[in-house]
Image (cartoon, rainbow, N blue to C red):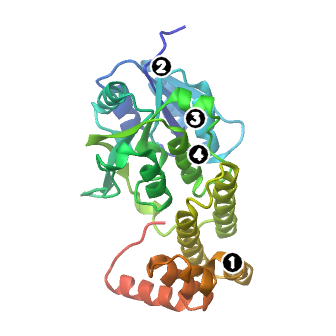
Amino acid sequence: MDPKPLVSIIMPVYNSDRYLEKSIASLTGQSMRSVEIICVNDCSSDGSLDILKRLAEKDGRIKIVNNSKNIGPGLSRNIGIKKSRGEFVCFVDSDDWLETNACDILYRKAKESGADIVFIKPKIVFGNRIDLDGRLLSEDDVKNNDVVFRKTLLRKVAWAPWSKFIRRDLLIKNKIQFPDIYITEDMDFSYKAIYYAKKITFAKEYLYNYYLREDSLTSFTRPERRLDNYFESIRLLETFLRKKGILKKYYREFVYFKLYTYLAAHGVMYHSGGQVDKKKYKSLIRRDSDFTIGGALGLGKLDSVICGSLLIKLGLFNPVFKIREFFRFLGGKKRAA
């Protein structure tokens, strides 16, 4: 057997033949050589598997796992975690790429600090434009994992799996996996990893390149499944907080998470046309006891949570959303799915 690698890079692959070679080249070209690259092919119907086989013949560090059926990126990452042997794991999407020194910097940061998780700063790439993601941690934040946990629920740090360099034992010991949903599955994984981590830090360099594809914008395929997944993500978070006896402690963050999820659900309904039973989902939202006027005011601060909940409760969110979309269209702005 090959020597145990220091880092396992896990990549779910589905119909990515246009981007795959560049992405994997950034992994095989890492300045740290002690890496394994686990590519989980999720029943791709394009040329992705052929590319993987050709690249694996050139570099034995590339391991290919073929799913027997299409299961989505979350469950594919679970398979990668199970197959991994590295001291640390990180995740790369098949159309993104790492800076050449990423694994080396992240590994040294983790070892020097003793951290279970090192947050990774991403660059957002769209065409010829590059933006630096502003959802970042500070030195003060990482002094207390509670702050990081709260910021995660409030979406003030990135949820995405690729935003974290994680000690493998943390995942195995605490049985942390991605749930069987394909929307917000990264949120469930992230808050559990952060909850169980003993120490968290971040690398100062921007080491991940997140490629925002043109065909990933305004994509609302399978809207009913998306909506069901949104509601399931709320149930999963509430179940976890109750199980750990911390729902009261993080109640405000939980309500904010629900609001954000409901707003996303409204967006899907808005773009879905007649594909879903909108009355069914709107009724579920309006019956939520956390968003009664009294409950909202009980949060003690007039902010986006209260304003958003009142718009939903009074049935005014859709008109406001439509007005916003109209002016975004006039301004030529595109919105990410």
Question: Residue 322's spot in the image, x, y percent?
Answer: 49, 88
- Residue 192 location (% of width, % of height): 57, 45
Residue at numbered disc 3: 40
49 displayed left or right of 132:
right
The amino acid on which the numbered mark 4 sits, given as a three-letter code, is Pro
Q: Report the residue marked by disc 2.
A: 57
- The quadrant holding residue 120 is top left
Quadrant placement of the N terminus = top right
Q: CA distance from mark 4 to mark 2?
A: 24 Å
| Whole-number angstrom distance, CA of label 3 to CA of label 4 | 9 Å
- Between 312 and 300, the one nearer to me in the picture: 300
Mark 1 touches mark 3? (CB < 8 Å): no
Label 4 belongs to which residue?
73
User: Is residue 42 in view from this perspective?
Assistant: no
Q: The residue under label 2 is which amino acid type?
A: Glu
Residue plotted at (30% across, 49% down): 140
| Element marked by disc 3 | strand
Can residue 64 be seen?
Answer: yes
- Point out residue 109 in the picture as x, y percentages from the top left corner: 31, 30
